[in-house]
Amino acid sequence: MLYVKNEIGAIHRPDLESNDTELLWVELRPGLRPGNKKIVFGTCYRPPGMTALQVDSFLDSFSQQVENVMNENLDAIVIVGDFNDRCTHWDDRHENSEMGLKFYNLLNDLNLFQLIDEPTRYTEDGASLLDLIITDSPGFMDNINTMPPIGDLDHDVIYGYLQIKVTRPATIRRSVWHYARADFDQLNHDFVNAPWNTGLMLYDDINDLLNYFYGLVKMGMEAHIPKRDINKRKKDKPWMNGFIRHLLMLRNKYNGIFAKSKRLEDKIERNRLRALSKKEIRAAKARYRINQTAKLSDPNIGVKKYWSVMKEIYGNKIKATIPTLIDNNQTYSTDIDKANLFVDLFSDQCSLEPPHLITHYLKLNI
């Protein structure tokens, strides 16, 4: 069951649903003006106690429905519900769930984010994170949180704010220079012999002169430094590349074809593309993790580069948080404990000299 305010246009989308999964889809169109953003909202319930065969059937149905939704011309996907995953925190090993890490890995393969990271049901035996908020656009979500149960219910309420005024992220064209393969000897030779003085004789305006110098530098770089032009999308994961994007496009295309034709050959091709896409995504993630680990492990890494890598890691999250810290074999997991640890660290680094030395310095300066 899903309630929607009267001011928000909502259309039930049974064409996106499947009879074997309790997943309801609604298309939201805020306002009445043409061109308003389209958000597809789903609410799901997965009953506990499934067999391994039932789990695989649920995951396959969930994946197919999400892929069908992705074929729509939409701006954001949001899915909420009780998935009975029985983890304590989203990034743990999900050892108490009959799905294990299958659902966790599936969301990663589908480029989806799960935003709730605290238990939503508490019992005498422990606490479990059962109720989830899943989206492909975490930047459109704000103030994700939980609140105590309503009435005599035993699940916490999960909530968040969806920023309605969303825009489709623009594609940015940029050049990537491969400096490791550059011919710097020839580049230096060309720069030494470049007609720099000609610009001083030709132009009086500083902007014209700057454009002239920039053109000479760019011409030399293009001649001796390999480069390639790429399309960068703000919602892309850092490991995304053109080949994976092409595979996902083909996968979604054949998913739509099979949804209409129901032919066996179309299903086989769709499944082949799905398997190939997952394989390439896992390989790209592995390469990305190895590359980032190598950068952070470099003892000569500078402060600017370090935070640049950290921004790459956390850039697509709605809120980058400091991970659990370990100091002298003691862990610090809460925000207040981590803040106090940093205060102690910085105060040790910035403590004043002993009083007798301070007096000595003052006497020298008088």
Image (cartoon, helix red, strand yellow):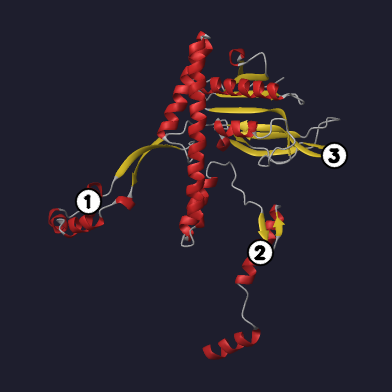
Q: Mark 3 vs mark 1: which is more N-terminal? A: 3
**Side of 279 relative to 157 (left or right):** left
Q: Which residue is mark 1?
A: 220
Element at label 3: loop
The amino acid pointed to by label 2 is Val
Image height of 202 relative to 17, above or below? below
Between label 2 and label 1, give the one nearer the viewer. 1
**Side of 187 relative to 52 (left or right):** left
Q: Mark 2 vs mark 1: which is more N-terminal? A: 1
Q: Nearer the viewer, residue 189 or 102?
A: 102
User: Which residue is depicted at the point 46% across and 56% down?
Assistant: 305
- Which quadrant of the structure image shows residue 345? bottom right
* Visible residue check, residue 366: no
Q: CA distance from mark 3 to mark 2?
A: 36 Å
x, y (%) of residue 183?
25, 53
Q: Which mark is residue 125?
A: 3
Q: Nearer the viewer, residue 100 or 207?
A: 100
